[in-house]
Structures are given as structure tokens and as C-alpha cells.
């Protein structure tokens, strides 16, 4: 029942990009699996080969890696997003980072095998794949620009403005990791922002 509900919502959103016939929609969705995972579930682990493409329907997911005992957040994924470790998925090589549910999540999951078969048989599938790759590259580029060209205060302001719901659903330590500062520095940053806000009132 939930699968059909989410499929209908997904098709409605897809129509904003382009139309798809009933026949193609049936073909593209016949191998989609609907799954629910609890907070803390690892979807893809270090050194695992990414074998699925995910559509995040509900909840939040984090991409991160560990180095010298510290966790480094690459990005967060919000509802209504397509996601996976693209490099591992395309090359079928071990993943260099972890994909973890930071809340309970509902997803659609499509295997690498079925994705490749769809590319061979459907121009629509190819087009969807291209859109996914393009958006992933743009998101990665914007993240890299922010890391290089903006300070922590500006990165935090961007996060608040662009992803307010995400901020409500992750803890302070993870917010600090996302904007690439320590929890202690993040605490000082929030105090300074509050102090600056009080001055302007």
C-alpha cells in the first residue's frame, strides 16, 4: 500500500521534468523495492561495493568517512532525493565512505543489475540516469566551492537558509561536522551569532 502511494507521488514529481507513458512507467518501476530502515542503519559501508540506487522518500541520510578517529561528513541527503555512492556504483568498486540513516527512513531501492538493464532498453531510463549524475556533480561542486570560499559562519548561514528542516533533524555535533568545524568551535560560533543578533536589536 505504501509502495503504491510513494510511486504515485514520485510520478507526479517526475512529470515536472518530463512526461512518461504508462507503459514506460510500468517497466521502470516493476523492479523497485520499497523498504523501511531504522535510524543508524548502514546502507553502504566502507569497502562494500555499491549495488543499489536509492530514492529517499522520508527521513535523512548522511554520507561520511572516518580518519584518525574522527568522523568527516561529506553531505546529507533530504527526502525526495536520488542517492548512492555514484563512483562505487558505476565502477563496481569498494566504497570509500559510509551511507547511514540518521533518522528512520523509507526508500525505494533499485539494483545495479536492473538499472543497467533499464539503460539498455529505455531512453527514459538513460535520461533519468543522466539527470541524476548531473545533479550529483552540481551538488558536489557547490559543496567544494563552499568549503574553499566561505567561512564557517557563512556555511552555517547557508545551511539554515537552504535546509532548515535538516537542521531540525540532526544533532549539533553533526552540524559542526557538516560545516567542517569542531563541536567546540560550533558552540562558540552560535554564541557569537547570538551576541551579534542582540547588538542589532
Image (spheres, rainbow, N blue to C red):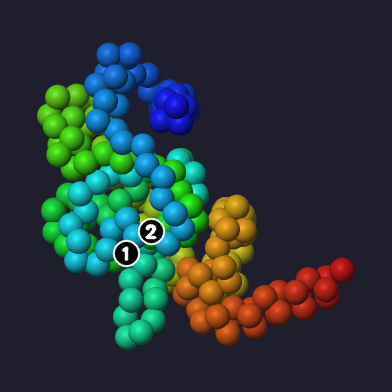
In space, the residues marked 2 and 1 are separated at their CA atoms by: 10 Å
* Proximity of marks 2 and 1: CB atoms separated by less than 8 Å: no
**Residue at image x 18%, y 30%?**
118
Q: Nearer the viewer, residue 4 or 161?
A: 4
Looking at the picture, how far across and down is residue 127, in whole percent? Answer: 26, 31
**Residue at image x 41%, y 30%?**
3
Q: Nearer the viewer, residue 102 or 71?
A: 102
Q: Is residue 35 above or below residue 1?
A: below
Sequence-wise, the earlier of marks 2 and 1 is 2
Q: Is residue 153 above or below residue 131?
A: below
What residue would you read off at disc 2? Answer: 41
Residue 34 lies in what quarter of the image? top left
Residue 1 lies in what quarter of the image? top left
- In the rendered image, is residue 197 in sight? yes
Looking at the picture, how far across and down is residue 196, in whole percent? Answer: 76, 75
What residue would you read off at disc 1? Answer: 98
Q: Is residue 132 above or below residue 60?
A: above
Left or right for 63, reference 119: right
Disc 1 crowd rating (10 Å Cα; few below 14, some 14-19, many 20+) is many
Left or right for 162, reference 191: left
Quadrant placement of the C terminus = bottom right
Looking at the picture, how far across and down is residue 19, in whole percent? Answer: 37, 19
- In the rendered image, is residue 16 in sight? no
Q: Which mark is residue 190?
A: none
The nearer-to-camera label among 2 and 1 is: 2
Circle 2 — which element?
loop
Circle 1 — which element?
strand
Amino acid at each position: 500500500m505504501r509502495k503504491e502511494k510513494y510511486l504515485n507521488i514520485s510520478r507526479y514529481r517526475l512529470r515536472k521534468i518530463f512526461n512518461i507513458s504508462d507503459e514506460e512507467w510500468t517497466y521502470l518501476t516493476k523492479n523497485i523495492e520499497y523498504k523501511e530502515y531504522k535510524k543508524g542503519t548502514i546502507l553502504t559501508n566502507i569497502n562494500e561495493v555499491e549495488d543499489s540506487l536509492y530514492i529517499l522518500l522520508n527521513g535523512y541520510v548522511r554520507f561520511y568517512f572516518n580518519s584518525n578517529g574522527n568522523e568527516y561528513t561529506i553531505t546529507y541527503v533530504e527526502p525526495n532525493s536520488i542517492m548512492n555512492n555514484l563512483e562505487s556504483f558505476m565502477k563496481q568498486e569498494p566504497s570509500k565512505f559510509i551511507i547511514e540513516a540518521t533518522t528512520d527512513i523509507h526508500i525505494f531501492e533499485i539494483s545495479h543489475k536492473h538499472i543497467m538493464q533499464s539503460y539498455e532498453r529505455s531512453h527514459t531510463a538513460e535520461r533519468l540516469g543522466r539527470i541524476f549524475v548531473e545533479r550529483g556533480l552540481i551538488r558536489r561542486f557547490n559543496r567544494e566551492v563552499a568549503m574553499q570560499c566561505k567561512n564557517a559562519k557563512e556555511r552555517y548561514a547557508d545551511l539554515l537558509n537552504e535546509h532548515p528542516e535538516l537542521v531540525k533533524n540532526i544533532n549539533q555535533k553533526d552540524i559542526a561536522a557538516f560545516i567542517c568545524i569542531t563541536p567546540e568551535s560550533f558552540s562558540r560560533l552560535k554564541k557569537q551569532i547570538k551576541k551579534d543578533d542582540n547588538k542589532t536589536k
